[in-house]
Every structure is written in structure tokens, then in C-alpha cells.
Amino acid sequence: MIEIKHEEEWSGTDCTHTIRIKGHSGYAPLMEDIVCAGVSTLAYTLIARLKDIKAWDFDMKDKQDGMTISCVCTNYDRDINEAINFAMTGFKLLGSHYPKNVKVV
């Protein structure tokens, strides 16, 4: 199962968003797994969007056991929040359609 966790940590008007993605969906064999592909597509689309809007404090770690995306949003940056909300909506949608394979916590 893929577990996706979104955390927000506030400091004044700044918010650090951290999205952690761990595990494998187990829906199908590797390289044939549409659920894993959907999660990966949303994650890499979020990363591309954060780079595109030049999120000033952005980090991504992609390892064998999972991915962590973190970004600081200053003074409620609308573009950053919309990008994160879009990705999280997609993750939740995948979780609702594939509850045995994706869990958003």
C-alpha cells in the first residue's frame, strides 16, 4: 500500500508543507501498476509546478523507499497552496478509487 501524508507546520505567516509518499501499491507487477503510475504522475507534476512558480524554499528527496516533497509558503502564497491542494485532491481521489492500494493520512 502507498501511504501519503501531508503535514503543515506554521511559523508566523510562513507554512512549511511536507508531503511524504511511502510504499508500493501492489495493484499490479512493477512497470505495469497504474495506481503507482498515478501517484508518481501527481507527485512529479507537483514538483514541476513548484519549480515553475519558483518556490523559494523547496526540496525533494526521491529514494527507494519513498519520496518527500517539502516547501515553505510565505504569506499564504496562492500558487503554492493551489499546487499542493491540486496534488492532494488527486491523491485522495486515487485513495477513494483504490482504497486497498492508496491511503492518504
Image: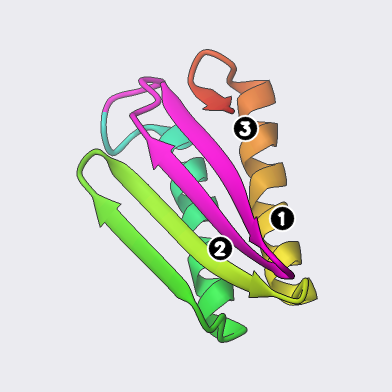
Q: Amino acid at mark 1?
A: Phe
Q: Nearer the viewer, mark 3 or mark 1?
A: 1
Residues 24 and 29: in front is 24
Q: Is residue 17 left or right of residue 35?
A: right
Q: Which residue is mark 2?
A: 46
Q: CA distance from mark 3 to mark 2?
A: 15 Å
Name the residue located 49 percent from the left edge and 54 percent from the top edge. 43
Q: Which residue is mark 1?
A: 86
Name the residue located 58 percent from the left edge and 45 percent from the top edge. 7
Q: Which residues are magenta?
A: 1-29
Label 1, secondary structure: give it: helix
| Colour pattern of the rendering | rainbow
Residues 25 and 12: in front is 12
Mark 1 or mark 2: which comes first in sequence?
2
Q: Are marks 1 and 2 in contact (CB under 8 Å)?
A: yes
Name the residue located 42 percent from the left edge and 41 percent from the top edge. 21
